[in-house]
Image: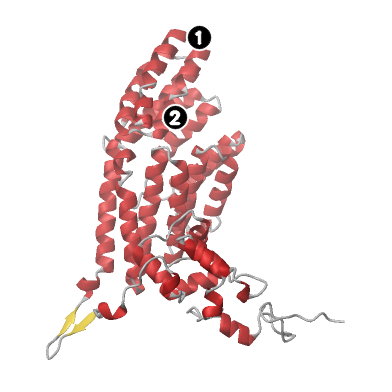
Amino acid sequence: MAVGRYCMRCGGRLARDSRASMCSPCRQVSGIGTDRAPDFGSDFWYTDQMRDAFATWDMGTVVRTYRYHPAHGHKPLPQETVSRWLGTVTQSQLSRIESGRNKADTLDKLVHYARALKMPTDLLWFSLPDAASDPLPRVDSILALPDGPLVPAASIGAGSAVADALLKTLDNYSATDNLVGAHSLVSVVPQQLQFIESLIDHAHGKDRMHLLYVGARYAEFAGWVYQDTGALDAAMQVSNTALDFSQEAGKEAFGAYVLMRKSNIATDAGRPGLALKLADAALSNAERLSPRMRAVVLRQQAHAQLQSGDLEGCARTFDAAFKLADQTPASESDLAHYCTPEYLEMEAAHCWVEMGRAADAIAALQQGLAGWQPTYRRDLGLCLARLSVAHASREQADHAVYVAERALVIALETRSYRIASQLNRIPALLDAAGADEQARTLGTRINLLKSWKES
């Protein structure tokens, strides 16, 4: 005998051919499948659990309690449904807001949530603006003047123009980062990202899509800024925002790039298992990525394989990356245009040291440094630090100290966590090679890095 299926909200019997979890009347009342939240009425809002949620003054708690209200039946409202009603957040963003990882604490966001979900004003801990007090009309792309001409008004909305200007500013930030390090941008870029998020909240159509992409670019760069200053948790969190924005904007290739960046952060955090999964996810649609983009993801995958102890896999992956990087010339429109064979040689050198191929690493690093561009000063410090590690691994103590001291100068200027991480390895390598005095002297100088870590 077939077992009947019942509506999760009212308990009524569902039709045999229905795949829904609620009957049609309950779906209509609950608002599932619609673009706007229903009006649940006072019996819904004025329960002890809802009052307690509002008393926390935390919108994430209120929304979570709203979703888990008994009026919805045996299952909570899906986050996808509520995020659709809100219209300005994705399901993953809503999840982070509910968990407290992100906050909806600006007045415009609080007002939007309250209005979108039709919350009673007397339960709110903030005031809703009176609609009558703000009668300004929306300005469309064409402004019709009374008894006058039609005026193109795109400059008033200007979403795409602002987005283009912000991308140019991001190029300047990148140049600054290359010269003096990310510490100079650690308070600037996150603020710019907040500004872009406020623009996204009020944008529509093509302007919104363009701003979402710009937001993804800024969030990815903010992740880099946090990573290079050693704030790895913050780096991973803001990179999640970059992934959300890129997915909503339909920028699949950039989404793969962000996954590669998340994998790189996981490697720095000493989590090779997560790093490998993220790199694999970045390559899930490899055929849609440019050769250089696939090469830069493979480079990161190789680093994760090395960290997990798979030395043979690391070597094979780098070989595949070299073949891809050599296929096409660099294109400025490709975010991974920098992933040339020469760049991969420098990256592979780090792995070769760990594989016991320090001589190969030294040769590759010296060759790359011979044609170094001075605009990449911070990365010069990283390459010098890696070269010093390679010299120390070969028990070339004098060379290791000489190069390390030059890298230390740049580390102090740029406050780069990555340079510091490499430099901190060298005294132990020198000590193991029997260069005790040089290890102590260099160790004392490297301790200068603690001054900016603690400041």
Residue at (36, 59) in percent of width and height: 215
| Scheme of image coloration | secondary structure
**Foreground of the two, 153 or 393:** 153
- The Cα–Cα distance between marks 2 and 1, rounded to whole angstroms, is 22 Å
Q: Residue 387 in the image: x percent, y percent?
A: 41, 25
Q: Which structural element holds mark 1? A: loop
Residue at image position (54%, 64%) is 64
Give, as a three-letter code, the residue at label 1: Gly
Q: Quadrant of the C terminus?
A: top left
Q: Looking at the rendering, which quadrant does residue 310 occupy?
A: top right
Tell which residue pokes out farthest to the right in this image.
1
Reply above or below: 410 against 329: above
- In this figure, which residue is indicated by the disc labeled 2? 421
Residue located 13% across and 86% down the image: 149
As drawn, 139 above or below 392: below
Residue 207 in sight here: yes
In this rendered view, identify the residue nearer to me: 227 or 381.
Answer: 227
x, y percent for residue 80: 54, 69
| Percent x, y of residue 200 | 35, 66
User: Could you classify mark 2 by the number of other residues whose Cα lies within 10 Å: few (under 14), some (14-19), or many (20 or more)?
Assistant: some
Which residue is more in the foreground, 20 or 359?
20
- Camera-near label (2 vs 1) is 2
Q: Is 367 placed left or right of 31 in the picture?
A: left
- Total numbered circles: 2
Q: Between disc 2 and disc 1, whose residue precedes?
A: 2
- In this view of the protein, which residue sits in the foreground, 86 or 221? 86
Whether residue 211 appears in this view of the structure is no
Label 2's element? Answer: helix
Looking at the rendered structure, which numbered label has been put on residue 434? 1
Residue 42: x, y in percent? 52, 79
